[in-house]
Image (cartoon, grey):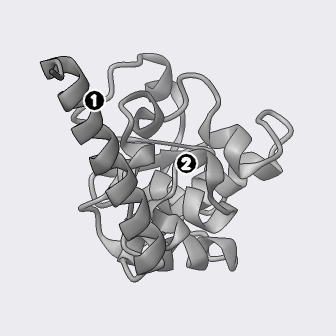
Amino acid sequence: MRTRKSIKTKKLLIMIFSIIALSVISGQSSFGAPAGQVSDLQLLARAINGEARGEPYEGQVAVGAVILNRVKSSSFPNSIAGVIYQPGAFTAVSDGQINVAIDPKSTVVKAAQDALNGWDPTYGCLYYWNPATATSKWIWSRKIIVKIGKHNFGK
């Protein structure tokens, strides 16, 4: 006689293997992969999704540009992953939104590509914040260069 626990375990294993098999069969892109297994484009798109989903397209590109501006700055890590995963830098990392799978055809992917191609609507900014939700007094010491959507972008 099987115990309830062993039956539940067996059902769980069957479900896990089914999900894995369906993912392989469907050819799921790496946009659905864990954040540690994605390209710079995909990671940047996920960060934009977590930080600027619902913002105008230019605002999405701007968030991507800030990340890339930090990569170029000697004050920050020198890789996209290093900047994005810098402790406390992005809400999308701390609340797990960085791990949300995104549609490869979504605007955040195009915004990430535009930022990687050099579009910088922030004019070199290293910071952005939403004035309605920002709690850091320090961020308000940054000079505001441009406002796009709900975000201020500053240096």
Q: What label sits on residue 89 in the rendered view?
A: none
Marks 1 and 2 sit apart, C-alpha to C-alpha, by: 28 Å
Which residue lies at the image location 49% right of the left edge and 66% below the top edge? 31
Disc 1 or disc 2, which is closer to the eye? 1
View extreme (front): residue? 1
Q: Measured along the vertical axis of the image, is residue 37 above or below residue 133?
A: below
* Horizontal arrangement in the rendering, residue 67 relative to residue 22 (left or right): right
- Say which residue label 2 marks: 35
Relative image position of residue 127 (x, y in whole percent): 55, 41
Relative image position of residue 51 (x, y in whole percent): 39, 48
Q: Measured along the vertical axis of the image, is residue 50 above or below residue 109?
A: above
Relative image position of residue 99 (x, y in whole percent): 43, 46
Viewer-closest of 139 and 53:
53
Q: Earlier in the sequence, mark 1 or mark 2?
A: 1
Which residue lies at the image location 68% right of the left edge and 40% below the top edge? 83
* Horizontal arrangement in the rendering, residue 108 relative to residue 55 (left or right): right
Q: How many marks?
A: 2
- Say which residue label 1 marks: 9
Which residue lies at the image location 25% right of the left edge and 24% below the top edge? 6
**Residue 146 in view (yes/no):** no
Relative image position of residue 7 (x, y in whole percent): 19, 30
Q: Amino acid at mark 2?
A: Ala
Viewer-closest of 11 and 129:
11
Q: Amino acid at mark 1?
A: Thr
Q: Image quadrant for the C terminus?
A: top right
- Name the secondary structure under disc 2: helix
Quadrant housing residue 98:
top left
- Name the secondary structure under disc 1: helix
